[in-house]
Image: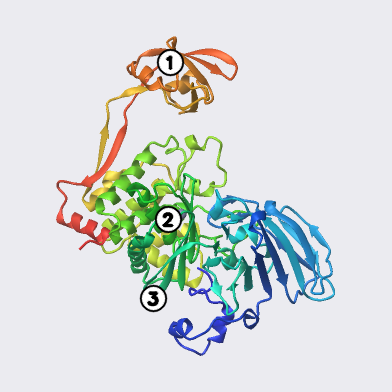
């Protein structure tokens, strides 16, 4: 949680001392000017030459007290736990004093510039940032003649040792463009105030001729902002967003922000992607088939996910997640909680709010079971290990790692079942989250990893150390049925008849041939020495093409001996192997025929059904 829940600057809070009630803050106090706020650090972002893909930034430090000031670009970005080295896109760095005289400037390392203060106490650092990354826009910045967008980490340097100070931001833009941001406006045009550097870069900003829908939930303003070909009437979305927001507010007892902005970039990128912020989110979504049912489920699901994060990680946060050290990505064993619990709640709040029905919730959980159970790495890595090593991304991670989103969501679901069972329906994972919000987030306190187990034990009144050791610190298989029966649910596992199986995935070569793109460890192809990159030419001397491959292989039964002729780089080889048999396994979650009244009641309580 940031320093105060309403997003007002500390100075402004001070002005209000002696007054009572947030009512006054929201209704009667006009926005301050930058001068009134007493801000020592000010930024100007110039977006008036969009065709150059360059933002021009001026960062001014008034009343500089030390002989040197160090300015730095973040090496990473909260919400994306990998190194980004934003300094790579910085150019034309220059420092001057208030009189316009150049100041000596030295680059100390990849991200830091040191400026020697001049005769007066003002240092103005100017630089440009090349911003032409539409593909990963929500973890970067982009400016062209259609719009400008920035995630603050990609454009704003911080003043070393002063990241806790308030800062102002003035945006200079083409006149016809508008601004959408989570930052607080001042009384000056296009000028905003942030209570710290963390806050400044936690407010992604869209500038342009976007489509915007506004609505109010629980007295708070909410905005949906669309960049791209949003040539549809999205007003029907508002009803679903209202339901989601109200559901979250009911879990936590209110909305801890003054206003919230959803920023969407509708692009040609296939995979959706979202980044959470304290009172906003920036989401990339494919513009094609946006409103088809399955795509809409994804759209509403990623929106709910990022929204739920405003509690779980932005305010209920693990150690290291604020105040931030921007020189390196912090490590935590708790991403299973920050992301896994959020993924579980994504589905749960959609079901509780009525955007999804119960069937969709259970189908979503069953799909997660299917995904996790098919992972080659499911027994190789625990949730805590996956959390701790997230930055490593080994080259064969597909075979050796797990997703803390997927397993984390499943473990959160099972944990919720078990807390409800052990407390006889008196407590749930909602209470664990509320405990963390009330006792940690409201006091701006991060939790340490070992505290999570203690909190779960305290809230539930039971000992969860065995559960924790098996499924969170450990790698044991999850006995889903054992937990699901608490809710009167049954996991149905159906297997198709076995199909001939080599254990490879393939892709088309330019000439219409077949190249191996992946070999599953332990499969017949793996044991025979077939490798990713091999081009398969013949099966038992019959030519293989991309088109005929599945028919050709389908002629053989599991257990048949086959010979594959292939090119391994420039070497022609023959590989003999015995085909395995692979059954496709389908997981479904249903109500138990013998579900008792208490079990049904427990499920109704989970889904907030009457
Ligand atoms: Zn997330």
Image quarter of the C terminus: bottom left
Q: CA distance from mark 2 to mark 3?
A: 29 Å
As drawn, the label of residue 231 is 2
Residue 223: x, y in percent?
44, 66
Residue 457 or residue 509, whichever sits in front: 509
User: Which quadrant of the structure image shows residue 304?
Assistant: bottom left
Residue 563, above or below 78 = above
Badge 2: residue crowd in 10 Å (few <14, some 14–19, many ≥20) = few
Badge 1: residue crowd in 10 Å (few <14, some 14–19, many ≥20) = many
Residue drawn at x 34%, y 54% is: 347
Q: Work out whether residue 466 can be spotted.
A: no
Residue beneath disc 3: 219
Q: CA distance from mark 3 to mark 1?
A: 67 Å
Badge 3: residue crowd in 10 Å (few <14, some 14–19, many ≥20) = few
Relative side of 327 to 454, left or right: right
Q: Work out whether residue 35 can be spotted.
A: yes
Labels 2 and 3: the sequence-earlier one: 3
| Name of the residue lying farthest toward the top | 541
| Name of the residue lying farthest toward the bottom | 18
Labels 2 and 1: the sequence-earlier one: 2
Q: CA distance from mark 2 to mark 1?
A: 54 Å
Q: Secondary structure at mark 3?
A: loop
Instruction: Check mark 2 vs ligand 1: CB closer than 8 Å? yes or no.
Output: no
Residue beneath disc 1: 577
Q: Do the residues under discs 2 and 1 have CB atoms within 8 angstroms? A: no
Q: Nearer the viewer, mark 2 or mark 3?
A: 2
Labels 3 and 1: the sequence-earlier one: 3
Residue 102 or residue 377, whichever sits in front: 102
Relative side of 143 to 469, left or right: right
Relative side of 610 to 228, left or right: left
């Amino acid at each position: 949680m940031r320093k105060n829940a309403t997003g007002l600057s500390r100075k402004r809070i001070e002005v209000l001392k002696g007054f009572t009630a947030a009512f006054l803050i929201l209704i009667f106090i006009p926005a301050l000017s930058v001068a009134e706020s007493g801000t020592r650090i000010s930024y100007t972002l110039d977006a008036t030459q969009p065709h150059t893909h360059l933002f021009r930034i001026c960062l001014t430090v008034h009343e500089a007290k030390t002989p040197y000031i160090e300015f730095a670009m973040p090496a990473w970005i909260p919400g994306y736990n990998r190194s980004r080295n934003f300094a790579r896109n910085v150019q034309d760095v220059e420092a001057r004093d208030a009189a316009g005289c150049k100041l000596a400037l030295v680059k100390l390392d990849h991200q830091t510039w040191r400026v020697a203060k001049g005769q007066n106490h003002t240092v103005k650092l100017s630089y440009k940032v090349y911003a032409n990354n539409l593909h990963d826009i929500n973890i970067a910045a982009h400016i062209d003649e259609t719009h400008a967008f920035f995630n603050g980490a990609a454009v704003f340097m911080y003043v070393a040792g002063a990241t806790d100070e308030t800062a102002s931001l003035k945006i200079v833009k083409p006149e016809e463009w508008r601004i959408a941001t989570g930052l607080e406006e001042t009384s000056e045009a296009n000028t905003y105030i942030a209570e710290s550097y963390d806050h400044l870069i936690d407010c992604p900003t869209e500038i342009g001729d976007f489509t915007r829908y506004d609505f109010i939930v629980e007295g708070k303003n909410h905005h949906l902002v669309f960049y791209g070909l949003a040539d549809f009437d999205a007003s029907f979305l508002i009803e679903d967003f209202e339901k989601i927001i109200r559901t979250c507010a009911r879990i936590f007892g209110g909305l801890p922000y003054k206003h919230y902005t959803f920023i969407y970039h509708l692009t040609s990128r296939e995979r959706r992607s979202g980044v959470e912020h304290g009172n906003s989110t920036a989401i990339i979504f494919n513009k094609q088939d946006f409103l088809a049912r399955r795509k809409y489920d994804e759209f509403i699901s990623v929106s709910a996910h990022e929204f739920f994060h405003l509690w779980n990680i932005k305010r209920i946060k693990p150690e290291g997640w604020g105040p931030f050290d921007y020189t390196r990505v912090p490590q935590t064993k708790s991403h299973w909680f920050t992301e896994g619990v959020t993924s579980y709640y994504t589905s749960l709040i959609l079901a509780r709010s009525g955007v999804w029905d119960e069937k969709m919730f259970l189908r979503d959980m069953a799909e997660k079971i299917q995904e996790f159970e098919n992972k080659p790495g499911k027994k190789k890595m625990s949730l805590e290990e996956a959390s701790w090593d997230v930055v490593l991304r080994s080259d064969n991670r597909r075979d050796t790692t797990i997703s803390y989103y997927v397993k984390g969501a499943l473990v959160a679901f099972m944990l919720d079942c078990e807390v409800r069972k052990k407390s006889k329906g008196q407590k749930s994972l909602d209470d664990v989250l509320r405990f963390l919000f009330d006792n940690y987030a409201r006091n701006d306190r991060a939790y340490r990893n070992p505290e999570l187990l203690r909190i779960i034990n305290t809230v539930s009144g039971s000992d969860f150390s065995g559960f924790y050791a098996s499924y969170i610190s450990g790698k044991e298989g999850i006995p889903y049925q054992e937990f699901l029966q608490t809710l009167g649910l049954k996991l149905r596992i159906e297997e198709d008849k076995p199909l001939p199986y080599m254990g490879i995935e393939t892709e088309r070569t330019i000439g219409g041939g077949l190249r191996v793109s992946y070999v599953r460890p332990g499969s017949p192809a793996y044991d025979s020495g077939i490798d990713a990159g091999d081009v398969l030419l013949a099966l038992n001397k019959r030519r293989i093409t991309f088109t005929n491959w599945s028919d050709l292989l389908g002629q053989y039964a599991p257990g048949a001996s086959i010979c594959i002729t292939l090119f391994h780089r420039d070497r022609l080889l023959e590989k003999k192997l015995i085909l395995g048999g692979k059954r496709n396994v389908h997981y479904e979650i249903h109500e138990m025929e013998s579900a008792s009244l208490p079990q049904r009641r427990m499920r109704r309580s989970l889904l907030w059904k009457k």
